[in-house]
Image: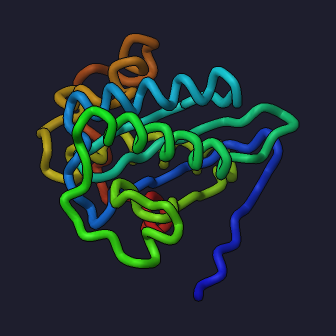
Amino acid sequence: MPHYLRNYVKGGTFFFTVVTYMRRPILDKIAISLLEQEVKACSSFKPFRVEAIAILPDHLHCIWTLPPMDDDYSARWRIIKASFTKEYISRGDGPSVKLTTSMQKKGEKGIWQRRFWEHTIRDERDFQLHFDYIHYNPVKHGLVRAPQDWPHSSFHRWVEEGIYPKSWCGPTEDFPKDVGSK
């Protein structure tokens, strides 16, 4: 069994990738609204700031900053995934996958992949590269032609704040290999 090492930094800023089980495209408009609601609910009692986010049909990318004396992003993801799963299933949506014995033992419901990928943001350049990667991701996956066309992204907030021009189309060259991937 693999041993996953997480980098916990109090008050750190982290890039995350969270994927649906078997990359099933379950994150439609209604599910995205539910996911946003669960993120907001979690942040109300275990605070964190969402710096950037893009939610695609089968995965999401985001950057969070935790409070100065807190490094427990894993608990936050556990809460968000569990509360989303409970609400998602209670609405009548559910997995159309056969749950393995291992999944059943762990109480998994076939909504999310078991883990998530995390990267500790090292500096301003690293932050900017991951920030841009998140907002360009719907274009990378062929869902839209420009970041402004994807409604489930913080891109629009950052256009309003003057960080991006509305016409921003992403990188002029590929992202470095260590940005947004394992």
Task: Identify the image quadrant of residue 104.
Answer: bottom left
Residue 168 showing in the rendered view: no
Q: Position of residue 13 (x, y in %)?
A: 67, 43
Please state if 62 lies on the left or on the right of 97 as rendered.
Answer: right
Q: Where residue 168 appears, x then y in whole percent?
A: 28, 30
Q: Which residue is pictured at 36% across the width and 38% down the height?
A: 54
Residue 114 vertical placement versus 127 (above, below)? below
| Image location of residue 173, percent across then percent down | 30, 56
Q: Residue furthest top?
A: 160
**Left or right of 131, for residue 6:** right
Depth check: give the residue in front, 57 or 144: 57
Q: Residue at x 33, y 62 (%)?
A: 21
Q: Which sits in the foreground, 167 or 40? A: 40
Give the side of residue 122 with respect to residue 71, left or right.
Answer: left
Residue 128: image location, x then y, percent = 52, 42
How many discs mark residues in the rendered view? Answer: 0
Name the image quarter holding the N terminus. bottom right
Residue reaching furthest to the bottom: 1
The coloring applied to the image is rainbow
Answer with left or right where residue 108 lies relative to residue 12: left
Residue appearing at x 74%, y 47% in the figure: 72
Q: Is residue 112 at least partly visible in the picture?
A: yes
Which of the 4 image quarters holds residue 68? Answer: top right
Rendered residue at 40%/18% (across/down):
157
Q: Picture quarter containing residue 76? A: top right
Position of 24 relative to 98 (above/below): above
